[in-house]
Amino acid sequence: MLRSLGILLSALWLAACSDDSAPAAAADVSQARDGAQLYRQYCVTCHGSGALGAPKVGKEHRLYWSHEIEEEGFDTIVSKAIAGINSMPPRGGCFDCSDEEVRNAVIYMLQLSGAK
């Protein structure tokens, strides 16, 4: 009797761990993460302090970022963020970030800086 109960509980436990949750997890992966979240997790370490020569982010650095957009263009800035530049690793070290997610982080940084 006790053995049967153990087998039944094991079967219920395995059923609870089935792949029914897999489609939901796959749906979450397909959605791009928020630029603010990625900035706080990967970018702020250098871009918040200017470490390793990274251009700082913030309203007081608006002219720098506005000039970059004007001179380089938004798509070029995003391409450099994806490929990496100088001391910055590709994708800012977020190796599982999609191109869209890197773009979202760049947009967020430009918004923080008030770049036009």
Image (tube, rainbow, N blue to C red):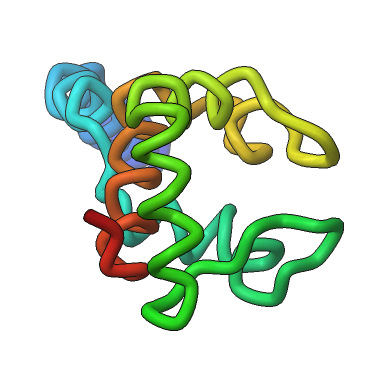
Identify the residue at horizontal 75%, vertical 39% (top origin): 88
Quadrant of res 94:
top right
Residue drawn at 46 percent across, 28 percent down: 72
Q: Which image quarter is the N terminus in?
A: top left
Residue 67, x across and y down, in percent: 43, 49
Outermost residue on the bottom side: it is 60
Counting labels gives 0
Q: In terms of depth relative to the viewer, which is nearer, 14 or 60?
A: 60
Q: Nearer the viewer, residue 22 or 86?
A: 86
Q: Quadrant of the C terminus?
A: bottom left
In which quadrant of the rendered view does residue 8 lie?
top left
Q: Percent x, y for residue 29?
A: 28, 26
> Is residue 20 positioned above or below 37 on the image?
above
The image shows residue 68 at horizontal and vertical percentages of: 46, 43
Left or right of 19? Residue 102 is right
| Location of residue 82 with respect to 59 vertically, above or below | above
Which quarter of the figure has residue 104? top left
Front-most of 5 and 37? 37
Q: Residue 1: in sight, yes or no?
A: no
Q: Is residue 32 visible?
A: yes
Residue 60 falls left or right of residue 12:
right
Report the front residue among 81 and 60: 60
Residue drawn at the location 70% of the way across and 76% of the way down: 49
Q: Residue at x 29, y 46 (%)?
A: 107
Q: Is residue 91 left or right of residue 5?
A: right
